[in-house]
C-alpha cells in the first residue's frame, strides 16, 4: 500500500498539465496522515489477528482441499454465462464500445440501455480467467491438460477488450500475477520468465485502450488537448504514456478537488458509500445527492479509494478510513498466511488489486466488487473439501 502511494505521489510532481493545481501544504499533510493511519492500523491489527485468529474456529472457511473437476465446471459455467451476457448486451445495445464509431459516447449509451446485471455477466471473464489460472498454477502448467483453459483465457481477454475498459484487463492482470506468487512461490529465475510478460500487457493495455477509445471518439491527441499537456519536447513514443500519467495524477487531483469542495458544501454522511446498496434495494430516498461537474472537470471520473469517503465524511476520512481499511486487508493477509486455501488465496489476490488501484479509483462504490466477492465465496463453498480429492 505504501509503495503504491509513494510511486503515485511522485508522478504528479512532473506537473505536465497546466490544469493541475499545486498541492497546498494542508493537502500534503492529509495525504501523509492517511498513510500513517494505514500503517498504524496495520501494526495494531497485525498484533490482534496474530493473537486472535478467529477464522481458525470456522472449519467451513479453513478447508485446505478443493475439487479440481468442480472448479473446472464452474469456469465453464461462467464462460457460458458470459457468452449469453455478450449476446444480450449486443442485442440491447446494438454494438460494443470498442467497435462503435464513437466509443466513449457509446459506453454511456450502453449503460443506459443495458441493465447492470447483463453488463456484469457479459464481462464475467474478469472471474473465469483468474479461476482458470488458479487451476493452472495449482496443478502446474501442462498444455495438453490445460489447452482449453488457455483458449478460454484468450476468448475472455478479447471479450473484455470489446468494452474498451483498461481497468477490467488490468484487474485480471494483477490478480493473475498475485495468484502466481501465492500459489507457485517462484524463485527469481521463474519470476523473471513470468512477470515481465504480464507487466508488458499491463503497460500496453493502460496506454492502448484509452488511446484507441479516444481516437475513435475525438481524433488524435485528444487527451493531450483536454489536459493541456505540451508533448512537443517529449522523447519520441513517450507521449503514448500520457494516459498512464493522467490516470494517476488527475485522480490525485480529483481527491484534492473533492476535499476543497466539501470544505464549503454539505457532506453526504455515508450516503455515497451506501449508494450501491440503496440502489439495489430501491431506496431512492436515501440516495446521495451531488453534482460531480461542480467538483471537477466532466472528463474526470475517479479519484482514489478515499474520494467517496471524503464526500461522506470530509477531512475525517483521511484519519479514519485508512485505519479500518488496514484492518480488513491485514485480516485477509493473516487468513491467507495461516489457512492457505482457494478462498484465502483468491481474497488476498483480490485485495492486492484493490491496494494497487487505491491510487486510481474506489472499488467500494462499484457493484462488481460485491458480486465478485459473493461469487468467490459461493465457488469456495461448492468446490472446497475436507479431504484431498484425487
Image: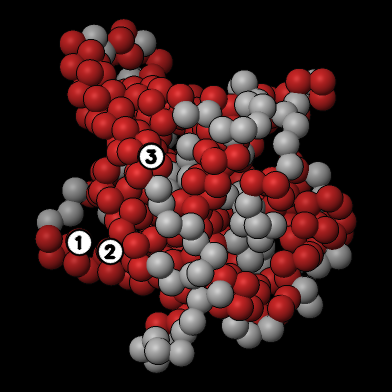
Image point 48% across, 40% down: which residue? 305
> Which quarter of the picture shows residue 347?
top left
Q: Can residue 138 be spotted in the picture?
A: no
- x and y percent of residue 99 in the render? 73, 74
Q: Can you say which quadrant of the picture contains the N terminus?
A: top left
Q: Is residue 186 left or right of residue 129?
A: left
> Which quarter of the picture shows residue 343?
top left
Q: Is residue 383 left or right of residue 125?
A: left
Q: Are marks 1 and 2 in contact (CB under 8 Å)?
A: yes
**Residue farthest toward the left in the current orientation of the protein:** 188
CA gap, disc 3 to disc 1? 41 Å
Residue with the mark numbered 2: 195
Mark carried by residue 26: 3
Image point 33% across, 38% down: which residue? 29
- x and y percent of residue 165 in the render? 60, 61
Q: Which numbered mark, 3 or 2, is in the foreground of this view?
A: 3
Q: Are marks 3 and 2 in contact (CB under 8 Å)?
A: no
Near-viewer residue (96 or 187) = 96
| Element at label 3 | helix
Residue with the mark numbered 1: 191
CA gap, disc 1 to disc 2? 6 Å
Mark carried by residue 372: none
- x and y percent of residue 289 in the render? 75, 32
Amino acid at each position: 500500500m505504501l509503495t503504491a502511494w509513494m510511486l503515485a505521489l511522485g508522478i504528479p510532481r512532473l506537473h505536465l498539465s497546466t490544469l493541475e493545481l499545486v498541492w497546498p501544504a494542508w493537502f500534503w499533510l492529509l495525504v501523509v496522515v492517511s498513510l500513517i493511519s494505514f500503517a498504524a492500523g496495520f501494526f495494531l491489527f497485525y498484533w490482534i489477528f496474530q493473537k486472535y485468529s478467529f477464522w481458525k474456529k470456522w472449519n467451513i472457511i479453513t478447508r485446505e482441499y478443493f475439487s479440481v473437476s468442480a472448479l473446472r465446471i464452474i469456469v465453464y459455467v461462467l464462460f457460458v454465462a458470459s457468452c449469453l451476457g455478450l449476446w444480450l448486451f449486443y442485442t440491447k445495445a446494438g454494438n460494443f464500445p470498442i467497435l462503435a464509431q464513437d466509443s466513449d459516447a457509446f459506453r454511456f449509451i450502453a449503460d443506459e440501455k443495458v441493465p447492470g446485471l447483463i453488463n456484469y455477466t457479459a464481462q464475467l471473464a474478469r472471474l473465469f480467467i483468474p479461476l482458470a489460472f488458479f487451476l493452472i498454477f495449482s496443478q502446474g502448467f501442462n498444455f495438453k491438460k490445460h489447452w482449453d483453459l488457455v483458449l478460454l483465457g484468450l476468448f475472455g481477454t478479447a471479450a473484455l477488450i470489446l468494452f474498451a475498459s483498461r481497468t477490467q484487463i488490468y484487474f485480471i492482470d494483477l490478480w493473475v500475477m498475485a495468484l502466481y506468487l501465492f500459489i507457485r512461490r517462484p524463485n527469481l529465475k521463474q519470476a523473471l520468465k513470468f512477470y515481465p510478460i504480464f507487466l508488458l500487457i499491463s503497460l500496453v493495455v493502460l496506454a492502448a485502450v484509452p488511446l484507441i477509445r479516444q481516437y475513435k471518439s475525438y481524433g488524435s491527441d485528444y487527451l493531450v488537448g483536454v489536459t493541456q499537456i505540451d508533448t512537443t519536447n517529449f522523447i519520441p513514443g513517450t507521449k503514448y504514456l500520457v494516459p498512464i500519467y493522467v490516470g494517476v495524477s488527475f485522480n490525485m487531483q480529483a481527491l484534492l478537488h473533492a476535499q476543497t469542495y466539501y470544505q464549503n458544501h454539505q457532506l453526504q454522511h455515508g450516503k455515497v458509500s451506501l449508494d450501491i446498496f440503496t440502489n439495489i434495494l430501491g431506496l431512492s430516498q436515501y440516495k446521495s445527492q451531488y453534482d460531480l461537474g461542480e467538483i471537477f472537470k466532466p472528463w474526470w471520473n475517479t479519484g482514489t479509494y478515499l474520494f467517496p469517503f471524503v464526500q461522506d465524511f470530509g477531512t475525517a476520512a483521511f484519519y479514519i478510513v485508512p485505519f479500518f481499511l488496514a484492518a480488513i486487508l491485514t485480516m485477509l493477509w493473516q487468513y491467507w498466511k495461516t489457512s492457505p486455501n482457494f478462498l484465502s488465496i483468491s481474497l488476498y489476490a483480490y485485495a492486492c488489486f484493490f491496494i494497487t488501484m487505491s491510487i486510481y479509483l474506489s472499488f467500494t462504490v462499484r457493484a462488481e466488487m460485491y458480486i465478485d466477492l459473493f461469487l468467490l465465496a459461493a465457488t469456495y463453498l461448492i468446490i472446497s473439501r475436507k479431504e484431498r480429492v484425487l
